[in-house]
Amino acid sequence: MPDTIKSIAIIGATSAIAEHCARLWVKDSAVNLVLVGRNLAKTEKVAADLRVRSPQSTIRSLAGDFVDPLAIRQLVANITSEGSPDIVLIAHGSLPDQIQCQQDLSANHEALAINGVSPVLFAEAFISPMQQANHGTLAIIGSVAGDRGRKSNYVYGAAKGLVTRYAQGLQHRLAKTQVKVVLVKPGPTDTPMTAQLKQQGGKLANVEDVAQAIVKGIGQGKPVVYTPAKWALIMMAIRHLPRMLFNKLDI
């Protein structure tokens, strides 16, 4: 296989955003792609579709535990055994019910673990071989929800706030290296995860547009990618609202 072929690993490859990013990458050129999900059958279904789209690419699917630190370490060691990837996209998560999280500590724990702790553990496992190779881009999907705690989704927002602070620290750690860290902050996007928001009449971004912005941002090595771009201004305004005004908002 030619050295020029990019190697890409996607964690949470069955998410709609991740799948559309993968489609863009295989459309661009032949790639060596590793898809990782929690359900092997679902992950392989995504892989099969991508193989049809790009017969010249090498695509394999893996499944594993997304919470256990030892399992995550072993899974990443498997992926990096033949070399550090050029691109790693950590894209998994879930949208929990805020009221349920307030009433059920197990649901609260699960939401924090899968949306916050798990992405951080995957990133930390990948970054060591990437730093050793002094090469590659690691992208981790956070959320605009992590920019300021709001009563409507503060458990999810807290998990994504963890991802934000972690990515910032990782960028600082790697500032003098050739390894790039891209923090992606999507606004509400039209995917199966947000089906309930859509039913409630929420205005959601097009998933293809969001994926294009992510792939472009990763290619440029941008430190932060808000997508759609308008969310950078929206969240800047929300972050800087005085507490007295903010507390009057029903958001």
Image (cartoon, rainbow, N blue to C red):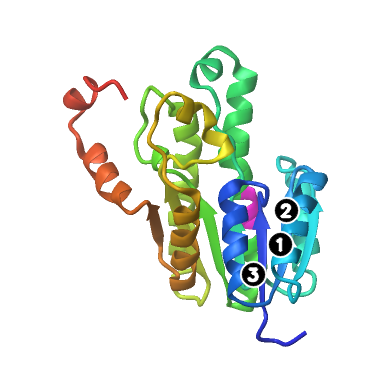
Amino acid under label 1? Leu
Q: Is mark 2 on a helix, strand or loop?
A: helix
Crowd class of label 3 (few under 14; some 14 to 19; many from 20; radius 10 Å): many
Q: Residue under label 2, please give it.
A: 46
Residue 159: say if magenta.
no
- Extreme top residue here? 103
| Viewer-closest of 97 and 244 | 97
> Residue at (37%, 51%) from the top-left corner?
228
Q: Name the residue under label 1.
A: 50
Tell me which label, 2 or 3, sits earlier in the chain. 3
Determine the main secondary structure of the stretch shown in magenta: helix
Segment tinted magenta in the rendering: 121-125
Residue 172 position by quadrant: bottom left
Residue 90 visible from this viewpoint: no
Please state which of residues 109 and 62 is positioned toward the viewer in this rendering: 62
The residue that disc 3 covers is 26
Q: What residue type is labelled 2?
A: Val
State the CA–CA distance, disc 2 to disc 3: 12 Å
Left or right of residue 96: residue 68: right
Specify the quadrant of the image occupied by residue 239.
Answer: top left
Image coordinates for residue 62, horizontal then vertical, percent:
80, 54
Is 124 a magenta residue?
yes
- Quadrant of the snapshot with the C terminus: top left
- The type of residue carrying mark 3 is Val
Task: Report the residue that reaches farthest toward the front.
Answer: 52
Mark 2 is surrounded, within 10 Å at the Cα level, by few (under 14), some (14 to 19) or many (20 or more) other residues, namely: many
Per the model, the C-alpha gap separating discs 1 and 3 is: 7 Å
* Residue drawn where x is 59% and y is 40% of the image: 93
Which of the image's four quarters has the N terminus?
bottom right
Q: Are marks 1 and 3 in contact (CB under 8 Å)?
A: yes
Coordinates of residue 54 in the picture (x, y in percent): 70, 70
